[in-house]
Amino acid sequence: MKRKQFLRRVGLGTGALALSPWLTSCLTFSDDELQGSFRNRLPFPGQITNPSFNLSASSAEIELPESLSLAAFQFNNSVPGPTIRHLKGQELNIQFTNNIGQESIIHWHGLIVPPEMDGHPKDAISGGAYDYEFSLNQRAGTYWYHPHPHRITGEQVYRGLAGFFIIEDDEEKALNLPSGNYEIPLVIQDRRVSDSGQIIYNPSMPERMMTGFLGDTILVNGAPSPYHEVEPGVYRLRVLNGSNARIYNVAFQDDLSFMVIGTDGGLLPEAIETNELLMAPGERADILVDFSGLKKNSIHLISKPFDVPSGGGMMGMQNMMGSSGPEQGTGFDLVEFRIDGESKQESVDLPGQLSESTFPEASSADRTRPIRLDMQMMNGHTINGRQFEMKRVDERVEQGSTEIWEFINNSNVPHPMHVHAVQFKVLDRSGNRGLTPTETGWKDTVLVMPGETVRVIMSFNAPKGLYVFHCHNLEHEDNGMMANLEII
């Protein structure tokens, strides 16, 4: 599809931002939905638009379609957690209540907040409540929230503690992007299922050191084999890779092209057309897809197979060393979109420029800082030769400074690197992969494949204090692949 043809079809959604009738319970499915290979209606968690609210984490045994069961952790009795949606500039008061029987704390992934509001592992609570107060002083974007206790983040996210955090602003609203029923949030997560149908989490040490915990079943918004009914029009998909370790190569059947309009830190400067998009754990992408003019009445969102560069021996050893999940790079079906009826959208044009973004130039950097990613057979994965210690300061940066960080992956496995308290711009990547469409905008998580060096530039304007940066393969993080960053 030519870009101009696509842009002529972009529609203006008419749905409201508040909780709408089309939002369904995460765990409600009727018998007539259990038909075909995609048997379950895609669920949507409820939304929180009140600036003062409680997020209560609790445990429960829940039953999913396909006779699956999960010993879940839930935010406000929902898996995934409710979607938090607010305007830029909003002051928030959030009380986190921990009733799961483990220590926990919430990290607002992608938000730039004071250090005591950021969810550092040192602030984890074993019970009771933790109060958050902060302002949303950043651009519109698709962010998310999840726990961040040391050594058990992977388990808590896997059991259900995660949700979208969507910020809106006037710049984005002026574009009249598809909204309401024409905006679809999708959190993609893989889970491992036992012969009895129980979703299990029990990674071995080789998995923690190598691949991370890879599942054999895909859940989207908490449901296996989901479908969603759409009109023959243009939809905005907010896609989050919420898996612990699995990377997805997001695409549509028949190489249907789509427009990437946003990434971790909000809208791109301009839309980019593509037919596939590699997404590591923690990464987000906003895409526009046109369901009109297709020759069939359904199409699948899929993850296309891909190769892990230089991963060879070590990636291929996972099944011999206790992992029963399909290997990294395996293809999956994700969601079926069923197209019916007539579009009620009003046609508008998407402008050539989506947002005003002024990225720092490499020449403006105050220093370049190498961040070496290695694996030591006795200790596991390390950052600059060390594993995480709660109060040791590993990197100090001056508030207001601009730095280039070089993520140098000397190991044989991929590492999605996430830095708290900043949004950064990817400058370049060694090898022949080049930059993905989402890497043309603001990022907080970047995939560093084996043997690659990725350079990013960022300005440290967050409040002074202690933050962390780490691999967002959650088993790697839990096994110590994290470091403290202090802004001074």
Image (tube, rainbow, N blue to C red):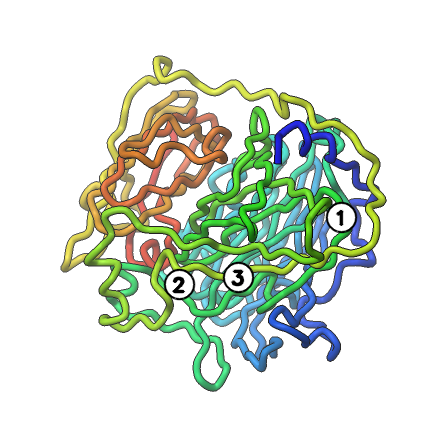
In three-dimensional space, the C-alpha distance between marks 3 and 2, rounded to whole angstroms, equals 29 Å
Q: Residue at x 52, y 18 (%)?
A: 358
Lower position in the chain sequence, tag 3 or tag 1: 1
In three-dimensional space, the C-alpha distance between marks 3 and 1, rounded to whole angstroms, equals 21 Å
**Amino acid type of the residue that numbered disc 3 sits on in the rendered structure:** Asp
Label 2: state its secondary structure. loop
**Left or right: 6 with respect to 396?**
right
Q: Residue at x 76, y 32 (%)?
A: 176
Viewer can see residue 146: yes
Q: Are marks 3 and 2 in contact (CB under 8 Å)?
A: no
Q: Are marks 1 and 2 in contact (CB under 8 Å)?
A: no
Q: Residue at x 27, y 73 (%)?
A: 322
Residue 396: x %, y % from top left: 31, 31
**Left or right: 346 with respect to 135?**
right
Q: From the viewer's perspective, is residue 32 above or below residue 26?
A: below
- The residue to which callout 3 is attached is 333
Q: Residue at x 39, y 21 (%)?
A: 401
- The residue to which callout 1 is attached is 232
The quadrant of the picture occupied by the N terminus is top right
Q: Residue furthest front?
A: 295
**Amino acid type of the residue that numbered disc 2 sits on in the rendered structure:** Ile
Q: Residues within 10 Å of mark 3 (few under 14, many from 20)?
A: some
In three-dimensional space, the C-alpha distance between marks 1 and 2, rounded to whole angstroms, equals 43 Å
**Left or right: 50 with respect to 289?**
right
90 and 372: which one is in front? 372
